[in-house]
Image: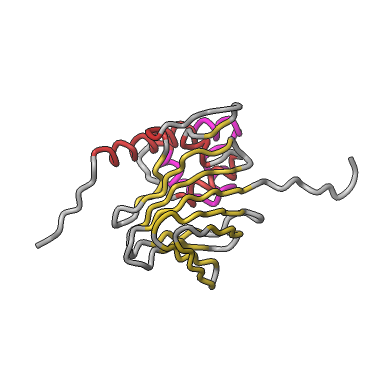
Amino acid sequence: MEKKVNISTEAVTDVERVSATVSQNLKLFRKQNGLTLDELSRKSGVSKGMLVEIEKGSANPSIATLCRAATALGVSVADFVGVAVNVPVRIVPPEDASILWRGPKGGSATLLVGTHGPDEIELWRWTLFPGEVFESPGHSAGTLELLNVETGALTLKLADSEHLVKAGSSVLARTEDKHAYMNCGKEELRFVMTVAELQRPRVRTGGL
């Protein structure tokens, strides 16, 4: 007998809310930059078809896709989903946090709050159930991730190396290369993560 997978109304509503917000902001930032869809596609490496679907609100883009588009537009992923902070203090209530990834067994990655781009500092909460894996391409040079494991054990894969981070432990990692978060244990894994992706100033080669 085929097992049914139930998706909560709250999850569907959250996906729709995030899609609508990303759709609106992508169009806004693209126009502010004076870019056509073709130009943004070339600059970001995201296909024009995907950009069209995102702007229509009919796509559920991956975190990596949002990162590439954000970098090309000089904004942050937090800007895209509406949780960026550009005032002295802003409190983001739980209902405004954005779930940007859902695992096949119910895991999730939630962007809680972040800075206004292009420099990105983001706070995430992750949940991975046993057997779940999230793979990510490398970020821009100098990107750092700071993680604290609350429950379970995280297997952090960086390029060809693997590191086991147990509950209560923290880790600082450079994530310029491809990497993955894996739950290879038998318990639910929960961790919080801060990502710092800062744009390096251009070095002058001569002149003023």
Span colored in magenta: 27-54
Q: Residue at x 42, y 33 (%)?
A: 21
User: Residue 128 placed where, x, y %?
Assistant: 37, 57
Q: In front: 51, or 136? A: 136
User: Where residue 80 appears, x then y in whole percent?
Assistant: 49, 37
User: What secondary structure prevails in the magenta region?
Assistant: helix
Query: What residue is shown at x 60% (from left), y 48% (from top)?
Result: 196
**Looking at the image, residue 35 lies above or below residue 186:** above
Task: Between residue 29 and residue 122, name the one nearer to us.
Answer: 122
30 within the magenta span: yes
Q: Quadrant of the C terminus?
A: top right
Q: In this picture, is 97 found above or below 191? A: above
Q: What's the image's color scheme? A: secondary structure
- Examine the rendering and report whether any part of residue 143 can be seen: yes
Residue 48 in the magenta stretch? The answer is yes
Q: Is residue 60 left or right of residue 85?
A: left
Q: Is residue 42 visible?
A: no
Q: Residue at x 33, y 38 (%)?
A: 14
Q: Is 130 situated above or below 40?
A: below
Residue 170, horizontal then vertical, whole percent: 53, 57
Q: Quadrant of residue 103?
A: bottom left
Q: Residue at x 39, y 43 (%)?
A: 99
Taking the image as shown, residue 134 lies to the left or right of residue 176, namely left
Q: Residue furthest right?
A: 207
